[in-house]
Amino acid sequence: MNPTSSRKLDHLRICMENEVECGRTGFEDVHLMHNALPECDLDRIDLTAPFLDFRLRSPLFIAGMTGGHPETVEINRRLATAAERFGIGMGVGSQRAALENSALAESFTIVRDTAPHAFLCANLGIAQLHDHGVEWAEKAVEMIEAQALVIHLNFLQEAIQPEGDHHAEGCLDALQKLCNNFPVPVIVKETGAGISEEVARRLLGAGVRAIDISGSGGTSWAVVEVIRTKYTRTAEVGRHFMDWGIPTIVSLMEVARTGAPVIATGGLRTGIHLAKSLALGAHLGGMALPLFRAGMKGEKILTNTIEEIHQQLRIVMFLTGSRTIADLQSVRPRVTGLSRQMVSPTMEEKYGY
């Protein structure tokens, strides 16, 4: 079995069977003021969400998480079924394994086969982009007929992983070359350690169209690698980095300040978290672990989970007097505690603290 493919399966089993969340997202510091006179109809709340040049039926996004092994075909089919049914966007996991071995492509092509109308995002690591160039990026997009390409940044995981790519020089140049005349929008995504305003501006300057912050407080890939490599020196080193990163709320406020389209991921577990993210400037809110675990239990449980998230979001919108996602994005959230302390003075000016 391809080493990359085998590692992917190990990661998914660990995420399914172990506690892999670590750190703090900051959602507990975000408060949306109750509107006692909302003047809207709960049953007519509109969840339609524009993103880039697309219009989605909901701001919930199925964050990229899996693929690259024969045993992942069914879970990707279930997730794609949900994306098609609810009209929501979906990302796939890293396509590296299928680009190294075309026999593994079915675990990704099943997504487009199942969801012919869904907004799908291909996925390639920036280390692979650096090593293989635009050709691999084009192949990743073609594989699932994607409308966008996600380039993921996972240097925390790479630094801890025994097989990790430790060479990060030249990645920004590779990204800029990709963005020049690439046929679909390029989105850059962290993988659980967050993105700062400074890095976001460098990415946007390179031509990136949107940013997925993936802050800390949700699934920690340092934790995953510690579990995978237990009883080794690598695991002992990794234990010190299990809660490393920028909390999701802090990263979201930083990146939202750039004005770029933002996907908030990193520990979102409820429709209330999704609503808070939107109020803080996100355009979409991505979830991986809760939807992966629900999907592994069956299509009905996955459907029920998404419906519950949507209903929670609708109730928050109703209780803040928000008929539309745009209305919710105009609601002024109150941020307290450690998250507020981490906000820079310029951020305080933006949010009026």
Image: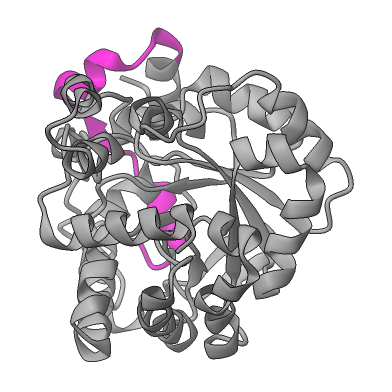
Residue 243: % across, % down? 20, 27
| 132 left or right, relative to 342 | right
Extreme residue in the front direction = 1
The span picked out in magenta is: 321-346
Q: Nearer the viewer, residue 295 or 307?
A: 295
Quadrant occupied by the N terminus:
bottom left
Q: Residue at (59%, 22%) from the top-left corner?
A: 168
Q: Would residue 286 be visible to someone looking at this image?
A: no
Residue 118: % across, % down? 57, 79
Q: Nearer the viewer, residue 281 or 20?
A: 20
Q: Residue at (12%, 32%) from the top-left corner?
A: 231
Is residue 256 magenta-colored?
no
| 339 left or right, relative to 1 | left
Q: Which quadrant holds residue 222?
A: top left
| 36 left or right, relative to 109 | left
Q: Nearer the viewer, residue 179 or 51?
A: 179
Does 73 appear above or below 208? below
| 67 left or right, relative to 21 | right
Q: Would residue 233 be visible to someone looking at this image?
A: yes
Q: Residue at (49%, 85%) from the top-left corner?
A: 84
Tally the marks.
0
Is residue 326 magenta-colored?
yes
Residue 344: % across, % down? 38, 11
Does 171 appear above or below 343? below
Residue 335: % across, % down? 23, 29
Q: Nearer the viewer, residue 214 or 260?
A: 214
